[in-house]
Image (spheres, rainbow, N blue to C red):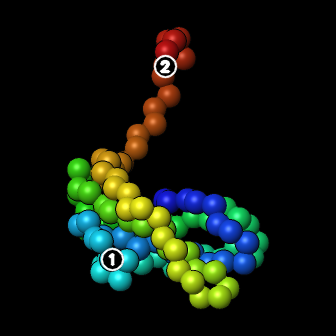
C-alpha cells in the first residue's frame, strides 16, 4: 500500500514497474486515479503478485491538477518482503506462562 497527501481539487495515481524508468509513460502498470474531493490523504494498493521475495518495485506518484497539469514524485524503490502463506494461532496450556 502506497499512501500520500494530495492537494485540493486534484487527482493522483501511482505508476509502477519492476525496472527503473525515467519517463512516467514507460511504467508497465498504473493504479486507479484517486481524487482529493473527500480527503487530502489517499492510498493505492499495487498488484505485486508477479513479484517474488527480494524483487524491486519502482514507483512514482503522479498528480494532475484541475487545469490538466501533471507533476510527479521522484522515483522510489521498495523491496518485496516475504509473504505469509499461513498463520497459526495456538493457546498455551492453562498452567503455562508466556
**Closer to the N terminus: mark 1 or mark 2?**
1
Residue at the disc numbered 1: 23
**Real-space Cα distance between discs 1 and 2?**
58 Å
Query: What mark, if any, has residue 62 been given in the picture?
Result: none
Nearest to the eye among marks 1 and 2: give it: 1
Label 1 residue SS: loop
Residue at x-position 23% and y-position 50%: 54
Residue at x-position 37% and y-position 77%: 24
- Circle 2: is it few (<14), some (14-19), or many (20+) Cα within 10 Å? few
Q: In the rendered image, which quarter is residue 40 located in?
A: bottom right
Q: Is any part of residue 6 visible from this angle?
A: yes
Residue 42: give x, y in percent of width and height.
62, 65
Residue at x-position 59% and y-position 88%: 68
- Circle 1: is it few (<14), some (14-19), or many (20+) Cα within 10 Å? few
Q: Would residue 40 be found to the left or right of residue 42 on screen?
A: right
Residue 77: give x, y in percent of width and height.
34, 55
Label 2 residue SS: loop
Q: Would residue 66 be found to the left or right of residue 89 on screen?
A: right
Residue at the disc numbered 2: 93
Q: Is any part of residue 33 visible from this angle?
A: no
Amino acid at each position: 500500500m502506497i499512501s500520500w497527501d494530495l492537494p485540493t481539487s486534484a487527482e493522483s495515481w501511482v505508476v509502477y514497474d519492476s525496472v527503473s524508468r525515467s519517463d512516467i509513460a514507460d511504467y508497465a502498470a498504473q493504479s486507479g486515479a484517486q481524487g482529493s474531493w473527500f480527503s487530502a490523504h489517499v492510498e493505492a494498493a499495487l498488484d505485486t503478485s508477479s513479484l517474488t521475495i527480494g524483487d524491486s518495485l519502482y514507483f512514482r506518484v503522479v498528480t494532475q491538477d484541475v487545469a490538466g497539469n501533471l507533476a510527479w514524485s521522484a522515483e522510489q524503490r521498495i523491496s518485496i518482503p516475504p509473504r505469509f502463506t499461513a498463520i497459526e494461532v495456538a493457546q498455551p496450556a492453562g498452567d503455562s506462562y508466556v
